[in-house]
Image (cartoon, grey):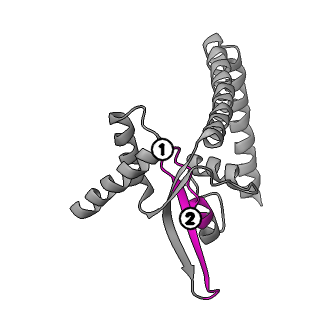
């Protein structure tokens, strides 16, 4: 008991010293400015993130998607088969639902995936645009799309799909 009382008294003294040091720092103008700027930066970061989310939602809404099949999932227990699609233009990717159902949490999603999940969850995502019915890796598909758009700026989506299919076959042959 005596040892505990001594420890308690020691902590009271240390806290008193710490509080006095904090009071001295509260009067430091440089430190005050630093704390103000830090708070301002935090507020701006929150605003920036909110605007970024709105920009992504607008991008998804306005995209005339070109869909590829990015994952075919079969559950042998339930006899259920699911196809997950991704857009090669805007990157919208339904695999976020597979990830969240497998891990049973949205906490493992990246920021981009969380935005996609929030956008698609509880919303009927219309499959406007073109469904290519092609199974492939979305990253590779987006890279091919990017190269096609780089070399043909005014190309229509139907022609993009034709070139995409050709390019993808070439990529698969090289692998």
Instruction: Name, please, the residue furthest toward the left.
Output: 174
Asked whether residue 175 is in view, the answer is no
**Magenta segment includes 92:** yes
Q: Residue at x 66, y 68 (%)?
A: 104
In the image: residue 81, left or right of residue 1: left
- The location of residue 174, given as percent across then percent down, is 22, 60
Nearest the eye: 101 or 35: 101
Secondary structure, mark 1, is helix
- The location of residue 72, given as percent across then percent down, is 51, 72
Q: Which mark is residue 66?
A: none
Q: Which mark is residue 84?
A: 2
Quarter of the picture containing the C terminus is bottom left
Nearest the eye: 26 or 155: 155
Circle 2: is it few (<14), some (14-19), or many (20+) Cα within 10 Å? some
Q: Quadrant of residue 38?
A: top right
Q: Which residue is mark 1?
A: 157
| C-alpha span from label 2 to label 1 | 21 Å
Q: Which residues are magenta?
A: 77-99
- The location of residue 12, given as percent across then percent down, is 75, 40
Q: Residue at x 69, y 27 (%)?
A: 43
**Magenta segment includes 117:** no
Q: Residue at x 62, y 86 (%)?
A: 79
In the displayed structure, would residue 19 be above or below residue 123? above
Q: Residue at x 58, y 46 (%)?
A: 111
Quarter of the picture containing the N terminus is bottom right
């Amino acid at each position: 008991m005596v040892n505990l009382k001594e420890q308690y008294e020691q902590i009271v003294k240390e806290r008193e010293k710490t509080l006095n040091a904090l009071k001295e720092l509260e009067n430091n103008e440089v430190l005050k400015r630093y704390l103000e700027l830090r708070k301002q930066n935090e507020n701006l970061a929150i605003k920036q993130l909110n605007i970024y989310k709105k920009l992504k939602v607008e991008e998804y809404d306005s995209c005339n998607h070109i869909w590829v099949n990015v994952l075919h999932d079969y559950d042998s227990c339930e006899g259920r088969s699911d196809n997950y699609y991704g857009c090669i233009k805007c990157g919208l990717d339904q695999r976020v639902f597979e990830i969240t159902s497998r891990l049973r949490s949205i906490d493992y999603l990246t920021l981009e995936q969380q935005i996609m999940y929030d956008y698609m969850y509880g919303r009927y995502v219309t499959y406007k645009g073109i469904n290519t019915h092609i199974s492939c890796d979305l990253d590779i598909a987006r890279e091919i799309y990017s190269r096609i758009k780089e070399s043909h700026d005014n190309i229509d989506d139907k022609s993009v799909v034709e070139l995409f299919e050709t390019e993808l076959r070439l990529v698969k042959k090289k692998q």
